[in-house]
Image (cartoon, rainbow, N blue to C red):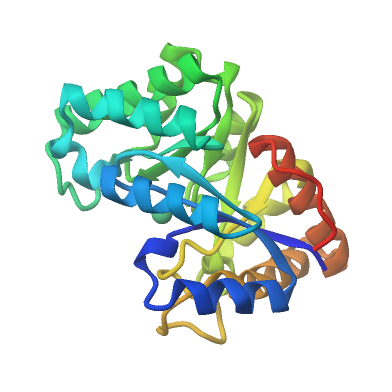
Amino acid sequence: MKLVDTHAHLDLLKDANGAFLRAQEAGVGQIVTIGIDLDSSRLAAQYSRDMRGVFCTVGLHPHDASKSRPELWAEMKLLALTTPAVAIGECGLDFYRDHSPRHQQRDTFMQHVDLALDLGLPLVIHDRDAHEEVLRILQDKGAERVGGVMHCFSGNLDLAQELVKMGFFLGITGVITYKQAKELRAVVKQISLNKLLIETDCPYLSPVPFRGKPNEPAYVVHTNQALAKALGLPPEEVAAATTDNARRLFGLPYIDA
Ligand SMILES: [Zn+2]
């Protein structure tokens, strides 16, 4: 099986090199590692240069929106262009934790959308308890021109359909393996398989049977299995489709492993 982990935080893992090797052994041949601030984006860029099959994004997580400065955006843009990055983010709104003031979260999210439109790159979006506002900003800015992924999708069927209509993908994490994720399993059944991506969000959100332990890209295999079960399809078919989706969205090369 050839899988893509479309949302990893390699810079937050204790042993990124070991995790990279275990991913390869597990058939996870491509990994998108996500920047959450300037330092993390620089590290992500470094991983993408050092590790074959690793690609990076640059962005400022909504938790850190208060760190936004005008000069930071020039550096982000340069980093995205020169590396090159495959997407802009992780960006969005988090009204659950509210680690940064909401007005700064909104400004910073809009700045990401502008940068993505400027560079013609898709968006990696984080949305927690802010579904309507995230959707409104994407619509107001015309973000469907670049598209992207709603990472760790946690909304209802209406939101899922709205996003798909705008050309966005839904990122499915290990949460789909959790007993209580009934709504998510019901939602994915109503969405076309060619709009779904799988991701770990490692080191967070380990799928069953690793729940509670640090997550890593190799475990996306379990998310693929749970998604296949929810859809009533063979895991190989879901793996092939989600890999193809990831390559289409992020422009990843077609490789055999
Ligand atoms: Zn993340």
As drawn, is 38 to the left or to the right of 10? left
**Quarter of the rendering containing residue 246:** top right
Where is residue 169? Give x, y as percent.
62, 39
Q: Which residue is drawn at 28% across and 42% down?
A: 38
Tell whether 194 sits left or right of 134: right
Quadrant in the picture for the C terminus? bottom right
Q: Nearer the viewer, residue 54 or 159?
A: 54
Quadrant observed for ligand 1 in the rendered image: bottom left
Q: Is residue 100 above or below residue 199?
A: above
Find residue 51 and report its horizontal and vertical position in percent.
Answer: 58, 60
In this rendering, position of residue 43 left or right of residue 172: left
Q: Which residue occupies the foreground of this view, 203 or 53?
A: 53
- Is residue 138 something one can see in this rendering? yes
Name the residue located 37 percent from the left edge and 53 percent from the top edge: 43
Residue at 49 percent of width and 53 percent of height: 152
Residue 2, position as x, y percentages in the image: 79, 63
Tell me how many marks there are.
0
Above or below for 221 versus 58: below
Q: Position of residue 211 (x, y in %)?
A: 47, 82
Residue 178 visible, this orientation: no
> Which residue is at the front of the view, 121 or 196?
121
Position above or below: 126 against 198: above
**Can you say which quadrant of the picture contains the N terminus?**
bottom right
